[in-house]
Image (tube, rainbow, N blue to C red):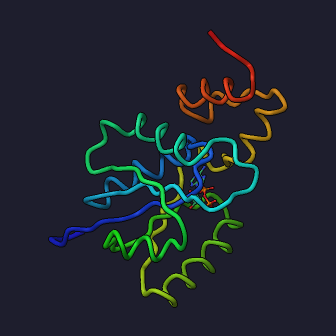
Amino acid sequence: MGDKFVRAIFPGSFDPITNGHLDVVHRGMRLFDELIIAVGRSPVKNQLFTPEERVEMICELTADMPGVSVESFEGLTVEYAARKEADVILRGLRSLTDVQYEFQLAMTNRAVAGIETVFVMTSEHYGFTSSTLIRQVAALGGDVSKLIPKSIYARLQHRLGRLTE
Ligand code: ADP
């Protein structure tokens, strides 16, 4: 994006990180000089992995990605963005349903903090992938191995009490 150094944050729950999220990360890497994957610590809905575990898993997956780092944060995303002196918030879009919610979120964040949100559309392969559905399907024994990285799949099986060797 021109000469200016651009730092973006990619906030989310990432419980767990999916191939869809990683697709967004790869696209973000091409757009920004620095990308911080920010794991929200908000008391979430049916948490499967702790924020620390999520950060650790994402760190492993992104270790060799230049310009990418991982952190967790508490409280308002826009306040975290300001603390990190981030220029933009990166979010992914899967469907029209996402657009409606994300539009509202982005407008609110711009109104309260003046920060811009940049959206990237996911690869058509992952448009239907969501962490919530992955948790639900995996808990009922469904095979989600194509939707998440191998290392995450192993952790998920472990967490759900299905030990794999
Ligand atoms: P949140 O609970 O804040 O929505 P998520 O971890 O579910 O956090 O998602 C973080 C971001 O990643 C959101 O912008 C969401 O739309 C996007 N995202 C989630 N899954 C996908 C996917 N399969 N493809 C593209 N973007 C995705």
Q: Quarter holding the C terminus?
A: top right
Q: Quadrant of the N terminus?
A: bottom left
The quadrant in which residue 34 appears is bottom left
Residue 104 found in image quarter: bottom right
Q: Position of residue 23 (x, y in %)?
A: 48, 46
Residue at 46% over, 74% down: 117
Q: Residue 163: percent from the left, percent from the top?
A: 69, 16
Q: Quadrant of ligand 1?
A: bottom right
Q: Is residue 141 above or below residue 70?
A: above
Residue at 68% x, 25% y is 157
Compared across the picture, whether 88 is left or right of 14 comes to left
Residue 33 left/right relative to 84: left
Q: Does 155 sit left or right of 32 as displayed?
A: right
Residue 90 vs residue 52, the one in the foreground: 52
Taking depth in this image into account, of 131 and 119 the one nearest to the observer is 131
Determine whether, in the image, residue 152 is placed left or right of residue 23: right
- The residue drawn where x is 81% and y is 26% is 141
Q: Compared with residue 165, is residue 63 higher up or lower down, i.e. above or below?
A: below
Residue 100: quarter of image = bottom right
Q: Which residue is more in the foreground, 15 or 20?
A: 15
| Marker count (numbered) | 0
Above or below, comparing residue 156 to residue 29 in the picture: above
